[in-house]
Amino acid sequence: MGSRKVVSRLAAEALGKSSGDYVSKDHDELAQIEALKREHGLDHVYRFDIGKNTDGFTPLISDVLDMPQLKDFIVENTIEYPDNHYQLLRRQLAMRFELDPEFFVMTAGLESMIDHIARALFDPGDKYVLPVPNFSVFESMSNRMQAEVVFVPLSAQLQWTEETTQAMVKAVAETRPKLVWISNPVNPTGQHVPLHEIRQVVDACKLAEVPVVVDEAYGEYSDTDDGYVSAAAMVPDNPHLMVLRTFSKMYSLPSARVGYMMCASPELRAAVNLYRPMFPFSWFSLYLAQLAVLDDDYIVESRTRLARRKAVFMGAVSGFTQFEFIQSDTNTLMFRHASLSADELAMALTKKGILTANLNKVDGIEGLQFLRMTIRSSEDNAVFVAACEQINGQS
């Protein structure tokens, strides 16, 4: 458009920054998959790069979708605007977490929620505390607002330890940041941080009057069969706390784009809602989430299957001397090769029709040559194991 500046200063500077994220909206994944099939003569490409429940959603949804009367129901609701207050879903979630329905804010996936929080809280030059490695979207959205990061590295073993907690508490006290970002289980390591450690950080933030986000996108993987293991229990007594969850991972509804925040502060909820679109997701997305949340048994079964498959997988790869796999509390595993770089290993797997997430530019583990994979079905996992065995033998 000529020499005239058409984008804002914030947008222009954000375009020049990178958080090292392994997911890019500019990358055409479907085109890549078709190109790989043609180039390497592949019949199938396995998506080990996406951290969702690959068994799919609850059979309850399938049963409802098979109902003959559903067509008229869909037509009737599709031609109307959805309920943008999400009354039923908020009540369903409130009952499960034992919270006030007013505490819930809904939006189109947690990426949007993180964006809304960053917009609502940050002024240029504000500081935020981030333990690393962590979810790179925290950085991306904070960078857009010209916020400045204060990193707190995890241990040398890439684990959140008591020392990490004390370092987080110290960083909050010394820098007085505008916000603290935390994921639990940690993305990408998959470690579940004990709630008493999270509570110490929440308490320190409360003392310093600093808002804190605990992103529990993978929370259902570290819940127990008896209930939620969540910072949501701390929400009523900590208005500065925002706890996030989603239907994209364990519930396997990533296309529905239903994420939510739990927060006791009317001020924070109103600020976040300010940036939420009037109708962030469709009626059908809302309907699927309302069905999914009813099936607790499916979540329990999914965790049980995952534990069994992960144990078999770890047993199978334990003898590969050139590989290192890091245990996790979720459905994802970080791994690397002793002599191949992350790019080389990713390419070797790609040629065999296996896509993984390349973490080598993620802050906190940059240059450490890690990839990440998702535990899938037993049959798919066997394909991954066979590929690693071939690569291990060639090293």
Image (tube, grey):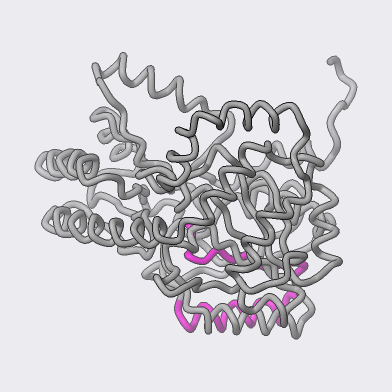
The location of residue 20, given as percent across then percent down, is 54, 46
Residue 231 percent location from the top left of the image: 59, 74
Quadrant of the snapshot with the N terminus: top right
Quadrant location of residue 36?
Answer: top left
170 magenta-colored? yes
Q: Nearer the viewer, residue 294 or 366?
A: 294
| Residue at screen point 80% across, 70% down | 265
Q: Which quadrant is home to the C terminus?
A: top left
- The magenta region covers 161-187
Comparing 77 with 128, the one in front is 77
Q: Is residue 121 above or below residue 109?
A: below
Q: Foreground: 149 or 49?
A: 49
Asked whether residue 133 is drawn in magenta, I would say: no
Q: Is residue 384 above or below residue 154?
A: above
- Residue 132: x %, y % from top left: 52, 63
Residue 304, by quadrant, is bottom left
Q: Give the residue displayed 48% in from the left and 83% down from the top.
A: 162
Residue 62 makes an appearance in the image: yes
| Residue sitting at the far front | 69
